[in-house]
Amino acid sequence: MKKEQQAFELVIFDCDGVLIDSETLASRIDAEELTRLGYPTSYSDVVLRFTGLSSATMRKMVEEDWGRALPDDFDAMVQARIKESYRTELQAIAGIDNLLHQLPSPRCVASSSAPEKLRLGLELTGLLPHFEPHVFSSVMVKVGKPAPDLFLFAAAKMGVEPARCVVVEDSIAGVRASVAAGMTVIGFTAGGHCLEDHGQRLLSAGAAVVARSAEDLGALLTTSEVRLRARMPES
């Protein structure tokens, strides 16, 4: 009997909020530092507005809204605080290490984080060996999420057509980038930053399905190929 063609050939993981539970740390620090400088904002505001975006994109949005420039050292200071919090508080998403050990499919990471921060988070949580050297940052492309450039770059580097890729994303920007790239996207809501309605927001942005835990995600990636194939564009 002819073996049924697999629904996808590559799994592309976002990092923050998908592999490592870092969005709660970064969003808290962003909110504290922006408020301290005179741009009052809350943790939940940062989560809703900036999750999935690069630091440069967040800075541009804040400066346009505020009508003034952030200090030159703002990004460096915030990143230093975030890295320190990584060393004392960062955890992998529950169950994700076990999922990666069991996942047979080729995989890579495509994240809006800067390379140094991205690698640090994966190293501290012990997840880097699951991906190295296939770790891609938005600094490698001209335009980050929600543009499709990063996902298309990752697929090209891995030698896989976009239509044969499935992306795991926790952010609206990431879901939109995946859809624009012609890839199937699984929304993921296991991160501590995800609000009660976050799954529905990811579905509304274009996610094919939502996984609420690493166990849910593993089931989708390993046993639900037909369900995912039905939502994929023809290749």
Image (spheres, helix red, strand yellow):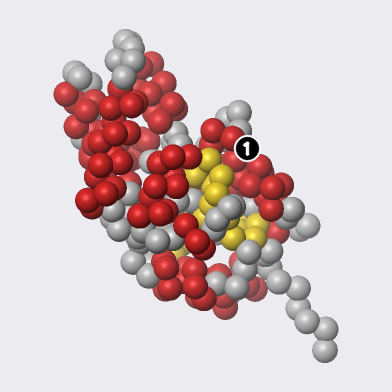
Q: Position of residue 16 (x, y in %)?
A: 40, 49
Q: Is residue 112 above or below residue 133?
A: above
Q: Residue furthest bottom?
A: 1
Q: Is residue 234 visible?
A: yes
Q: Is residue 153 above or below residue 13?
A: above
For the image shown, how many numbered marks are present on the structure?
1
Mark 1 surroundings: few (<14), some (14-19) or many (≥20) residues within 10 A? many
Q: Position of residue 203 (x, y in %)?
A: 48, 54
For this rendering, which residue is in front, 153 or 178? 153
Say whether residue 226 is left or right of residue 197: right
Q: Position of residue 109 (x, y in %)?
A: 53, 52
**Residue drawn at (53%, 37%), measured in percent from left and top?**
138
User: Which residue is denoted by mark 1 in the rendering?
Assistant: 149
Secondary structure under the numbered disc 1 in the rendered image: helix
Quadrant occupied by the N terminus: bottom right
**Residue drawn at (29%, 34%), measured in percent from left and top?**
80
**Residue drawn at (23%, 33%), measured in percent from left and top?**
31
Say whether residue 211 is left or right of residue 181: left
Say whether residue 68 is left or right of residue 214: left
Q: Which amino acid lies under the numbered mark 1 shown in the image of this protein?
A: Asp
Q: Residue furthest left?
A: 36
**Residue drawn at (47%, 57%), measured in percent from left and top?**
128
Say whether residue 119 is left or right of residue 125: right
Quadrant occupied by the C terminus: bottom right
Q: Is residue 69 above or below residue 137?
A: above
For this rendering, which residue is in front, 81 or 51? 81
| Rendered image quadrant of residue 188 | bottom left
